[in-house]
Structure formats: structure tokens, C-alpha cells
Image (cartoon, grey):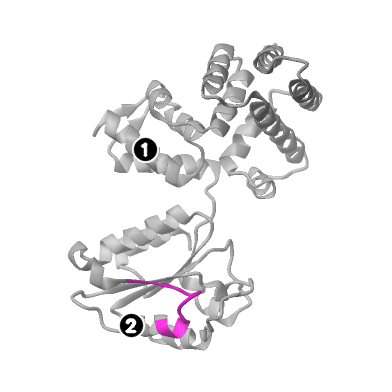
């Protein structure tokens, strides 16, 4: 089951007695738990109706006992337990023993007044285990969002805040803020406050308000160079220099991005999908998507030559054979040509 289907089910039929949430998108997991909380637990009694446990410190049996204890001052209670490593193939290094047979017994007759949520910090569960097979129907995956899903998530968040994006502004927001959902959420809150209910976020507003890390600035700088927006690229470079960013570091970051572009370009020729490459390269799918678009504007030979020139520039900078800022400016001019 995916998290959107699970949320729709909660809205339509109510929550299931047990959920297993696993995957790498921790923000979405927190968002899903908050959604269930809002649907089931009155704000006035949440201090009494929500309990949290850590399986590295608390046994599975103790957590189940909590789930079987009647809620205090509430119709339903929420029992949340993290670090359910016993549902994966990883070795549990904690000294707490977990009797999964107790969980199998509980699943046969779960308490109607409790919702038990088991959290697993892993990409997948060990489906060979009997207990995992029993939990299959209530397991929800929270994988890294692909490029399209990430954009849709940003637009849905905008709808919740009662504002919309002008054409291209949602993509620009992701490009500037990066793919971390926590960071994106904070930037969307900022945009919402600026434009107000019913407002429209334009590219200029994104340019003014969205905070960019050094890595994202380099990412955007290369995007500007690729699309022949030379003046913007130099503006970003000079802003980074004013922020006391070391030119050698910027050179290395630029080289890293061109290396990624080349790797994506070569791998896609071999039939790899962008999602597969994201996993192999340790990147977000959106970053792979942008790298693929950038790579379409260069040949393999051009990318190889750019990386060679960056290596030479790095050597000249470190050996004092060229002024660092001048060297970067000359490289960008040559690249745009």
C-alpha cells in the first residue's frame, strides 16, 4: 500500500488497527502520522491518548500491553513505536528481546480502541519473516519521491496553503530549495506568508525569497550556463564569492555536477532509468532528471574535456599559477562559448 492510498482509506473508512511505516522519506511518515492523529484524536486529550516507544529500549511485549490498555479520557489511543528492526533483515544490536509471536497473536484480534504504528527506518522489510507476511496488508512504503511526484507534492502543499504557482515557479522552487521535504516545507510556508491566501507565486518571488545552499547555487549556476544565461551565472558566482565561499571548493562542486551529468548520460545509454540511477548515484531522482536534461546539451567528448579543464584549473589555483576568482570567471566564459 502506498501512503496516499492509506490516507484516502483513513478519510473514508477510518484507520486500521495496525500500520507498519517504512522507507526513507521520514517527513512523509511524520505527515501521515499527523494526519491520523488529526482524524482520530481530539487536540484536548492528545497528551493522554498518544504514547511513543523505542524498540531499542522497550520490548515488543510492553508496546503491545500499552496498545491493549484502555485509553484515558479518549475514545481511541495512538501507540507509536520506532526502530522496529526485527521486521527487517538487519541485525538488531540492542539488548532488548522482541517476541514476534506476541505480535502475531495480537494481529488475530487487535484492540478496536488502539491504533498501533510500527516505524521501520529501512528501505524494505524482510518478507521471508512470518510476522512481515502477516503485516503485509498494513505495511505502507514511503520511498524517495521521483521527480514528478516531488513536483506534485509541492503543488499539493501549495493548495493546502491556499496559493498557487505561476508556470515554471514550482520547478524553480525545487531547483532552488533542493529535494529535502523538510526544507521545501519551510520554504513553502515562507512563500505562503508572502503571497497570502489566493496568491500566486511567480518566478521572481521564488528568486527573492527561497533560500539556496551553496550546493544548490552551484546546481543553478550550471543550469544557467547550460541554458546560456551567462549574466545570471556570473551574478550567482559573485554572490558566492561575496559570501566568502572558497573558489577551490566551488570548482570541486562544479566538477562534481559535471561528473554526475556524464555518469547519467552514459548510464542512460545503457538503459538505466532515472530512478535506478538515483539509487546507484545516491542522488534524488529530481537531481538525476535535471542532470539528464543538462547532459542532452553536451556530447560525451565535451563533458570529458570540461572535467579535464576543471582538474587543470584546480591545480593552477592550488599552485598559485592563477588568481582563483579570475580562473573561475575565465572557465565560465569558456564554458558558455
Q: Earlier in the sequence, mark 1 or mark 2?
A: 2
Indicate the position of residue 315 as horizontal and vertical percent values.
Answer: 79, 24
Indicate the position of residue 257 as horizontal and vertical percent values.
Answer: 67, 32
State the quadrant of the C terminus. top right
The residue lying toward the viewer, choosing from 76 and 276, is 76
Residue 83 horizontal side relative to residue 318, left or right: left
Residue at image location 73% in from the left, 33% down from the top = 259
Q: Is 58 included in the stretch rendered in magenta?
A: yes
Say above or below: 178 vs 336. Answer: below
Residue 188 numbered tag: 1
What whole-number distance in Å separates the C-alpha atoms at marks 1 and 2? 39 Å
Q: Is 101 included in the stretch rendered in magenta?
A: no
Residue at image location 28% in from the left, 34% down from the top = 193
Pointer 2 local density, CA inside 10 Å: few below 14, some 14–19, many at least 20: some
Q: Give the range drawn in magenta.
A: 51-62
Residue 111 numbered tag: 2
Residue 217 numbered tag: none
Q: Do the residues labelled 1 and 2 touch (CB within 8 Å)?
A: no
Amino acid at each position: 500500500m502506498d501512503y496516499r492510498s492509506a490516507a484516502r482509506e483513513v478519510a473514508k473508512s477510518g484507520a486500521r488497527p495496525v500500520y507498519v511505516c517504512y522507507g526513507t522519506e521520514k517527513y512523509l511518515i511524520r505527515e501521515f502520522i499527523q494526519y491520523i492523529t488529526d482524524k482520530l484524536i481530539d487536540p484536548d486529550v492528545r497528551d493522554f491518548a498518544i504514547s511513543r516507544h523505542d524498540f531499542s529500549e522497550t520490548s515488543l511485549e510492553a508496546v503491545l500491553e500499552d496498545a491493549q490498555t484502555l485509553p484515558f479520557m479518549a475514545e481511541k489511543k495512538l501507540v507509536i513505536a520506532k526502530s522496529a528492526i526485527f521486521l527487517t533483515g538487519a541485525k538488531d544490536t540492542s539488548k532488548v528481546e522482541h517476541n514476534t509471536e506476541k505480535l502475531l497473536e495480537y494481529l488475530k484480534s487487535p484492540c478496536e480502541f488502539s491504533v498501533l504504528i510500527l516505524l521501520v527506518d529501512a528501505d524494505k522489510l524482510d518478507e521471508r519473516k512470518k510476522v512481515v507476511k502477516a503485516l503485509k496488508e498494513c505495511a505502507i512504503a514511503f520511498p524517495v519521491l521521483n521527480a514528478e511526484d516531488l513536483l506534485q507534492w509541492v503543488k499539493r502543499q501549495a493548495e493546502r496553503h491556499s496559493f498557487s504557482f505561476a508556470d515554471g515557479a514550482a520547478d524553480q522552487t525545487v531547483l532552488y530549495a533542493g529535494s529535502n521535504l523538510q526544507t521545501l516545507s519551510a520554504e513553502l510556508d515562507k512563500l505562503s506568508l508572502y503571497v497570502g491566501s489566493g496568491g500566486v507565486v511567480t518566478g521572481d518571488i521564488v528568486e527573492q525569497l527561497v533560500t539556496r545552499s551553496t550546493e544548490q547555487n552551484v546546481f543553478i549556476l550550471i543550469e544557467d550556463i547550460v541554458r546560456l544565461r551567462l549574466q545570471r551565472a556570473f551574478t550567482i558566482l559573485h554572490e558566492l564569492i561575496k559570501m566568502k565561499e572558497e573558489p577551490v571548493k566551488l570548482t570541486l562542486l562544479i566538477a562534481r555536477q559535471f561528473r554526475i551529468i556524464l555518469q547519467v548520460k552514459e548510464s542512460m545509454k545503457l538503459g538505466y532509468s532515472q530512478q535506478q540511477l538515483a539509487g546507484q548515484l545516491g542522488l534524488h531522482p529530481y537531481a538525476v532528471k535535471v542532470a539528464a536534461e543538462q547532459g542532452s546539451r553536451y556530447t560525451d567528448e565535451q563533458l570529458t574535456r570540461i572535467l579535464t579543464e576543471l582538474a587543470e584549473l584546480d591545480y593552477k589555483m592550488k599552485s598559485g599559477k592563477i588568481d582563483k576568482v579570475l580562473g573561475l570567471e575565465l572557465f565560465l566564459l569558456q564554458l558558455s562559448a
